[in-house]
Image: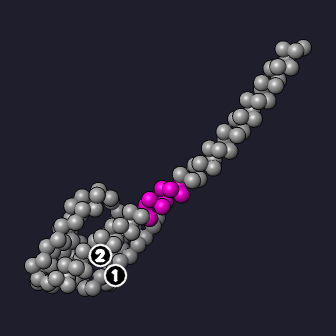
């Protein structure tokens, strides 16, 4: 009878450890999702602020200005509407105000980008 008692106690301990492990797993998986969303938010802000500031600086500097920026291989969906540069990464959207309506996005590589002012038109690409 003592061996059966030990087997039941071991089974109870195993089930309790399994329950604790499952609870910890769900808590940490939620935290991982929060961390991923925060990273995506920071990446979108970085891209929007870097591109937007550089485009505005090139526009202010005048015709013939060329600037090269490095986005450190961060990627996102980028478009321009009205006087805003929009950056979307996953489900997070950031916009950055632009000083000109004449900004054109050419083919983008998310490593080094060249921003040019040619006759008052800012080209990003």
Question: From the viewer's perspective, is residue 72 above or below residue 116?
Answer: above
First-in-chain label (1 vs 2) = 2
Q: Magenta stretch: residue 40 in it?
A: yes
Q: Quadrant of the N terminus?
A: top right
32 displayed left or right of 24? left
Q: How has the structure been colored for display?
A: one colour
Query: How dense is the environment of label 2, judged by Cα within 10 Å: few (below 14), some, or many (20 and up)?
Result: many
Residue displayed at 54% across by 58% down? 34
Local secondary structure at mark 2 = helix
The reply to whether discs 1 and 2 touch (Cβ–Cβ < 8 Å) is yes
Residue under label 2: 52
**Where does label 1 land, which residue?**
97
The reply to whether residue 8 is visible in this rendering is yes
Q: In percent of the image, x 25 and y 85: which residue is there? A: 100
- Please state the extent of the stretch shown in magenta in the rendering: 33-41
Q: Residue at x 39, y 66 (%)?
A: 44
| Quadrant housing residue 76 | bottom left
Quadrant hosting residue 83: bottom left
Q: From where the camera sits, is residue 121 visible?
A: no
Query: In this image, 104 relative to 26: left or right?
Result: left
Image vertical order of residue 101 relative to residue 51, above or below:
below
Residue sitting nearer the eye, 60 or 77: 60
């Amino acid at each position: 009878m003592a061996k059966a008692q030990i087997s039941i106690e071991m089974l109870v301990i195993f089930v309790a450890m399994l329950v604790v492990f499952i609870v910890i797993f769900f808590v940490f998986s939620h935290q991982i999702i929060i961390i991923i969303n925060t990273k995506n938010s920071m990446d979108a802000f970085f891209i929007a602020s870097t591109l937007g500031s550089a485009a505005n600086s090139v526009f202010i500097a005048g015709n013939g200005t060329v600037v090269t920026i490095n986005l450190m291989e961060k990627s996102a969906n980028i478009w321009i509407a009205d006087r805003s540069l929009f950056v979307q990464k996953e489900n997070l959207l950031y916009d950055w105000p632009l000083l000109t309506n004449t900004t054109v996005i050419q083919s983008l590589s998310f490593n080094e980008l060249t921003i040019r002012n040619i006759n008052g038109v800012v080209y990003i690409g």
